[in-house]
Image (cartoon, rainbow, N blue to C red):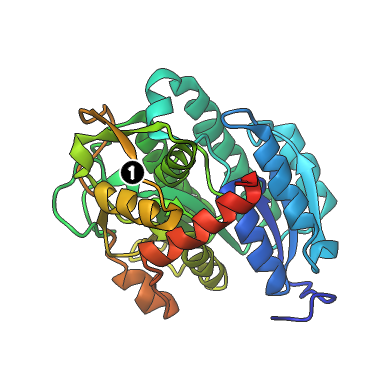
Amino acid sequence: MPDTDTADPARHVLVTGAAGFIGMHACIALLERGWRVHGVDNLNAYYPVRLKEDRLAWLRRHPAAGRFEFTRLDIADAGAVAAVCGQAAFTHILHLAAQAGVRHSIDHPLDYAHSNLVGTSVILEAARAARIRHLVYASSSSVYGGNTRLPFSEEDRVDRPVSFYAATKRANEAMAYSYAHLYGIPCTGLRFFTVYGPWGRPDMAAWLFTDAILAGRSIRVFEQGRLRRDFTYIDDIVEGICRVMERPAPADDAGAPHALFNIGNHSPNTVNELIAIIEAATGQRARREELPMQPGDVEATFADVARLSAATGFEPATSLESGMRRFVDWFRAYHGR
């Protein structure tokens, strides 16, 4: 671990969504690598704000937290973003802020237009004004829609999204590409695959199932638990982020410095396997409520990570069993169970 009292002045990053699950872990990882980090987040109430506040409190207790600053703001507020960028000479931006959740997007699409479309436009403009060396932004495996050829490759067709959330994430990729092409800003999009781990999101299966099983409540299981997901442990996600941050996207054959990478465990598991692992980790049996497949869901996700491995020398390798044991241990400690 680098000396936590020093920082490389050439590496000062603005992290959006810093109070989020991936955002908090990414901030810590970057601090440990000697970066100066300024986090922003609006702490919205999509899930309990207390969890976001606790993440920030945990982050601020880190030995390198003297190099961390935080501003509460909405990334769709161009004036607020410009004010923060005017206070510091950021060299990089890690754009993780977004309205998340596939199912929520079915009933609340304007939340996604505001955060994911307007918000990303504001961040792209901030990157252009600051002449950022590298903008790394979060995309999602959801962009692959109903593709049936597995594993998913960055070369696959992604113009048939099956949720509005996925549509906004694919739009973000096109928006970033246009800025790379027009203004020469190196931009890299990361397609995350079903991220889980300590400090995770309460709307995700790992949290929902663990919480319900420990409390003796039933869990909602769709399509008889046969759906497969490329569950990816948070430490693998942030290792991929940090390695990509150090490698600005090279120009493509059209001269645009833009790249896309899958970050997934490239080893999908069924939801039934996830449930069995949680049962083993908690020592309790799940009570199941069987339901049909939901709108916006897909049969399987599976990441081809050859491009990430070739570019960074890294590919995720944490097994679902190992990662979920760590999550359940954290969950019990956090909730005092």
Q: Give the x, y percent position of residue 137.
A: 52, 52
Residue 38 in percent (x, y) is at 75, 54
**What residue appears at the point 80 percent right and 41 percent down from the top-left corner?**
83
Q: Name the residue nearer the viewer: 274 or 149.
A: 274
Q: Residue furthest left?
A: 149
Camera-side residue: 229 or 242? 229
Q: Which residue is mark 1?
A: 142
Rendered residue at 39%/52% (across/down)? 278
Q: Quadrant of the N terminus?
A: bottom right
Residue type, mark 1 in image: Ser
Q: Is residue 11 visible?
A: no
Task: Tell me if residue 86 comes above or below residue 31 in the rendering.
Answer: above
Where residue 306 appears, as percent x and y from the top left, is 30, 72
> Residue at 72% of width from left, 67% of height from top?
31
- Is residue 129 visible to the viewer in this orientation of the structure? yes
The mark total stands at 1
- Seen from this angle, which residue lies furthest top? 107
329 and 156: which one is in front? 329
Number of residues whose C-alpha sits closer than 10 Å to that of mark 1, classed few (under 14), some (14–19) or many (20 or more): many
Q: Position of residue 227 (x, y in %)?
A: 22, 44
From the viewer's perspective, tell me whether residue 29 is left or right of residue 103: right
Q: Is residue 252 above or below residue 194?
A: below
Q: Of helix, strand and loop, which one carries label 1?
A: helix
Would you say 113 lies left or right of 288 here?
A: right
* Residue found at x 66% / y 53%: 15
